[in-house]
Amino acid sequence: MKKFLTAALLCLTTAGFAQPLPKIALQQVFPKLADERPVWMSEAPDGSHRFFVVYQTGKILVVKKGSDGGDAKEFFNIEERDPKAGGENECGLLSLAFHPGFATNQLFYVYYNQRNPAEQHTQPLNFPIRTVISEFKVSAADADKADLKSERILLQVPQPFGNHKGGQLSFGPDGYLYLGLGDGGAADDPFNSGQNVATLLAKMLRLDVNSKTDNAFGDRSRHLEYGIPKDNPFVHEPNMGERGARKEIFAYGLRNPWRYSFDRLNGALWIGDVGQDLWEEVDLGVKGGNYGWNVREGAHHFKPGPEGAKYIEPVIEYTHKTNLQAKGLYPDHSLGLCIIGGYVYRGKQFPALTGIYIYGDYNLGTYWGFRYDYDAKKVTAHGTLLQQTDNIDSFAEDADGEIYSLMQSGKIFEITAP
């Protein structure tokens, strides 16, 4: 992807909004961490003040909060499984989620990709890659080391191409595990996964890791290593095995939900969904929601769909092309090429940022933000917070609600308000 270089530090206010957004600045943390492509970072929910940094190549480092990173230890490593194979840019070890009871049960979950042996391709379609969702446990002998032998595979999803993997695992405030999956890749959603509820691709899934399912979908021989929440939207659809509506689905019509988050104030689910060639979007996730892909890209027509079908509008969208800005929901939003979903700031260090959803663009390195009125269901202010030159891989949030950004170069920054 072409990288556009800018150097100016800008804070653009939006005409017609009463409250301009503040500028932000970046303060580097863990400067001694040198590896490229950190794609996820979580603070352990056990009071130990440890950050776990996930690298796309297949390893996780653990560092002490407030250190320079020189104390980093290798917590987890599956590089020999070659999780980037088949999609160097978008496959890999892509996220980590700690069980809500991690402080006592020491369980955590990872998302990684793996190449299928030729004889194990899914028929009748030869899908060469699979996504693996696994549970692991921390070593009983060393709290800074994972027990790789403890792996319990919860779910494997066949993947037709090497891109659009989604790749995030997060526990919601309801205690269930959410999983964002892209449409499987290539371009134009060739298998029409976005609107097909018989596939797990192009979906947000919601799983109960504390139970298992026997007689899944009416098939006595099918057992799942996870439970399906009783209020998932398709739970009461007829049982047709994998040919019917998949009951793991929470929402659908997502092209590539690269990073989502829950507002810790009210549990609202914010999704950054990567677009095709013209539009990027931020969505407010709701149970059973249909976000339109591949009938729509953002709020705009993409492929023909059923007449009268209803889709959930993006909260924010932006375009790749100057000549399309006037057609966007927010014509004054600046350009970008690849959205990176972020977080609503709920920390205490920078009160000026409170309530702002901060998100960015991988290619341009731009940081944007908006304020959203949940009662009125509308954006009340939006604008550019910062422009810089590094590719943004992901955002992170610590236990105190402070927000960080992870750069492809390997640098990690805390987002501050000067």
Image: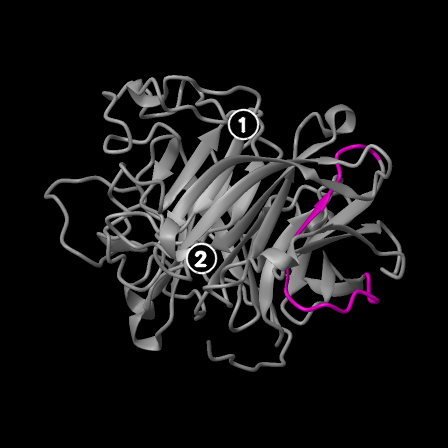
Q: Residue at x 49, y 40 (%)?
A: 179
Amino acid type of the residue that numbered disc 1 sits on in the rendered structure: Tyr
- Depth check: 297 or 246 in front? 246
Dividing the picture into quadrants, the one containing residue 137 is top right
Residue range (magenta): 30-47
Amino acid type of the residue that numbered disc 2 sits on in the rendered structure: Gly
Reply yes or no: does residue 38 show up in magenta. Answer: yes
**Disc on the earlier residue, 2 or 1:** 2
- Depth check: 173 or 388 in front? 173
Task: Give coordinates of residue 238: x percent, y percent.
Answer: 23, 20
Q: Residues within 10 Å of mark 2 (few under 14, many from 20)?
A: few
Q: Which residue is mark 1?
A: 176
Task: Give coordinates of residue 261: x percent, y percent.
Answer: 55, 43
Dividing the picture into quadrants, the one containing residue 405 is bottom right
The quarter of the rendered structure image containing the C terminus is bottom right
Q: Is residue 375 left or right of residue 194?
A: right
Reply yes or no: does residue 269 show up in magenta. Answer: no
Q: Residue at x 58, y 25 (%)?
A: 175
Magenta stretch: dominant secondary structure: loop
Q: Which residue is mark 2?
A: 16
